[in-house]
Image (cartoon, rainbow, N blue to C red):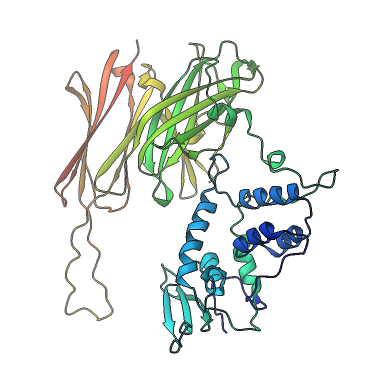
């Protein structure tokens, strides 16, 4: 048997034909359970399990075994266990041979740990009661290059004497999400119970799970941009009165240290997007309020978004819940998102200042970090300067020009370009108070369009609207976005 690999771990140990007998100490049910999970069980786990004699320890081991592989400790269901059991039933029938349960073949073990092969080649003819010898090949989806192969005999086993065990063990180790959950023994010699090993939620995590309101505050999502892996990055601002919280004097300024975190629940009520809590020091304004940012990264869909703010010193905390919060698919068709900022600061570096109250409004790129200053409620002072920002996605490109017959054969035709025109205006009561020159972009990737800063001293108190009109001239599509704000007296 040969394994050639680029991404699998090198070398794999002795043959896999392989369900070792459990120790005599294990009863029939315990042995049956082990056989059912042998594909996933690590050698170190097997050694611990077969030495167990106490039924309580055996039951505790089984709970710890699955919880180590649970992708989400916050849900009552172990999603991976459910997926594994369903796949095992499928493989039991798919690889059944000579009356043997297909889930106990090497084919099943490799399938579970490395995934289904990209291609299966028959290397001979199937005999009665047997399968045809096969060669499995895995191909990298992006490079289209082979990344590994394995040969199986007519009993769906790997040939004896091959050295592939280390690879399989490493693949099984990769299924463990929480290695800190372990089979350690307490002072009484018994396994430490799973419930005593589970991580305890921090105060703000507990607050998100069991919301309460020790003080009132508001939360506004103010920035939405395309993130990584098909997710949408959302940043918002929580504004709260600081009365009753631990307000400190820092160099003559009133400051309050707060923790902030966000959690998203899908339409079934399952937590799907929890951001790590962040601690920040925020200045208290003349109105007795402080403002801090929060963030979330979510796939397109509809959610209930929870934002929590917590003061460690006083142990006071509150949660704001936004039901029906919809996240669009910014990768599908023409979309425009935007925000209004009171100043934009660009500095060298690629690490956000996590203690800054508006840290979540930092974008990184080109060796610089760009910090936008959000304005809660869109309430600007006449002394402020206004920056208007829009992000445009989903522009359509023109068809690539035909290749020049006179060009060298190796020359590739130039890629088609987009043609998007953005008009920006500042309106009051439907009337245009200010307008920027139209901007044209030919990029097919994200467009960042920024107008300003505008000195608001020239505008009287009142309510205004920033209007972005976007025309995709190639696709023949329009998208209008309006962002309201107010200039205070």
**Residue 366, position as x, y percentages in the image:** 46, 50
Position of 114 compared to 251: left or right?
A: left
Q: Name which quarter of the figure residue 478 lies in.
A: top left
**Residue 118, position as x, y percentages in the image:** 42, 72
Residue at position x 58%, y 80% from top?
A: 158
User: In the displayed structure, would residue 234 be above or below residue 357?
Assistant: below
Of 118 and 95, nearer the camera is 95
Of 97 and 325, nearer the camera is 97
User: How many numbered circles does the render carry?
Assistant: 0
Residue at position x 37%, y 18% from top?
A: 379
Of 359 and 206, nearer the camera is 206
Q: Name which quarter of the figure residue 376 lies in.
A: top left
User: In the displayed structure, would residue 84 be above or below residue 67?
Assistant: below
Residue at position x 67%, y 41% from top?
A: 198
User: In the displayed structure, would residue 128 be above or below residue 49?
Assistant: below
Position of 481 compared to 90: left or right?
A: left
**Residue 397, position as x, y percentages in the image:** 22, 56
**Residue 129, position as x, y percentages in the image:** 47, 83
Can residue 361 be seen here? The reply is no
The quadrant in which the N terminus is found is: bottom right
Question: Most extreme residue toward the left, as rendered?
Answer: 476
The quadrant in which the C terminus is found is: top left
Can residue 166 be seen here? The reply is yes
Residue at position x 43%, y 78% from top?
A: 120
Of 253 and 230, nearer the camera is 230
């Amino acid at each position: 048997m040969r394994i050639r690999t680029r991404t699998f771990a090198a070398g794999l140990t002795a043959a896999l034909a392989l369900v070792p007998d459990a120790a005599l100490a294990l009863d029939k049910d315990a042995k049956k359970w082990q056989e059912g999970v042998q594909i996933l069980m690590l050698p170190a786990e097997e050694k611990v399990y077969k030495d167990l004699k106490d039924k309580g320890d055996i039951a505790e081991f089984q709970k710890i075994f699955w919880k180590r592989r649970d992708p989400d400790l916050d849900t009552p269901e172990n999603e991976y266990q459910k997926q594994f059991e369903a796949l095992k039933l499928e493989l039991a029938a798919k690889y059944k041979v000579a009356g043997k349960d297909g889930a106990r073949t090497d084919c099943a073990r490799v399938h579970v740990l490395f995934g289904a092969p990209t291609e299966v080649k028959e290397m001979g003819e199937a005999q009665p009661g047997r399968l045809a010898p096969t060669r499995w090949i895995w191909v990298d989806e992006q490079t289209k290059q082979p990344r590994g192969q394995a040969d199986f005999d007519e009993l769906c086993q790997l040939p004896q004497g091959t050295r592939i065990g280390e690879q399989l063990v490493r693949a099984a180790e990769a299924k463990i999400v929480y290695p800190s959950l372990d089979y350690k023994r307490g002072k009484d010699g018994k396994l430490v119970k799973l419930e005593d090993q589970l991580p305890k939620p921090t105060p703000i995590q507990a607050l998100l799970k069991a919301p309460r309101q020790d003080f009132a505050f508001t939360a506004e999502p103010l920035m939405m941009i395309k993130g990584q892996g098909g997710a949408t990055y959302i940043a918002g601002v929580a504004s709260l009165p600081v009365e009753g919280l631990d307000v400190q004097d820092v160099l003559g300024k009133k400051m309050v240290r707060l923790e902030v975190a966000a959690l998203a629940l899908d339409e079934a009520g399952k937590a799907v997007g929890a951001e790590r809590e962040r601690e920040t020091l925020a200045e208290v304004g003349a109105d007795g309020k402080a403002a801090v940012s929060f963030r979330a990264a979510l796939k397109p869909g509809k959610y209930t978004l929870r934002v929590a703010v917590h003061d460690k010193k006083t142990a006071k905390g509150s949660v704001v819940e936004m039901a029906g919060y919809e996240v669009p698919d910014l990768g599908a068709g023409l979309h425009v998102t935007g925000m209004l900022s009171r100043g934009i600061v660009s500095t060298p570096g690629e690490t956000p200042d996590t203690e800054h109250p508006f840290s979540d409004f930092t974008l990184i790129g080109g060796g610089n970090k760009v910090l936008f200053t959000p304005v809660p409620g869109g309430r600007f002072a006449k002394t402020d300067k206004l920056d208007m920002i829009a992000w445009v996605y989903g522009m359509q490109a023109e068809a690539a020009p035909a290749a020049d017959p006179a060009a060298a054969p190796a020359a590739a035709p130039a890629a088609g370009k987009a043609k998007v025109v953005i008009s920006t205006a500042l309106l009051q009561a439907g009337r245009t108070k200010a307008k920027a020159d139209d901007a044209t972009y030919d990029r097919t990737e994200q467009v960042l369009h920024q107008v300003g800063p505008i000195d608001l001293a020239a505008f009287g108190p009142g309510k205004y609207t920033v209007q972005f009109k976007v025309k995709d001239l190639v696709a023949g599509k329009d998208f209008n976005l309006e962002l309201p704000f107010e200039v205070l007296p």
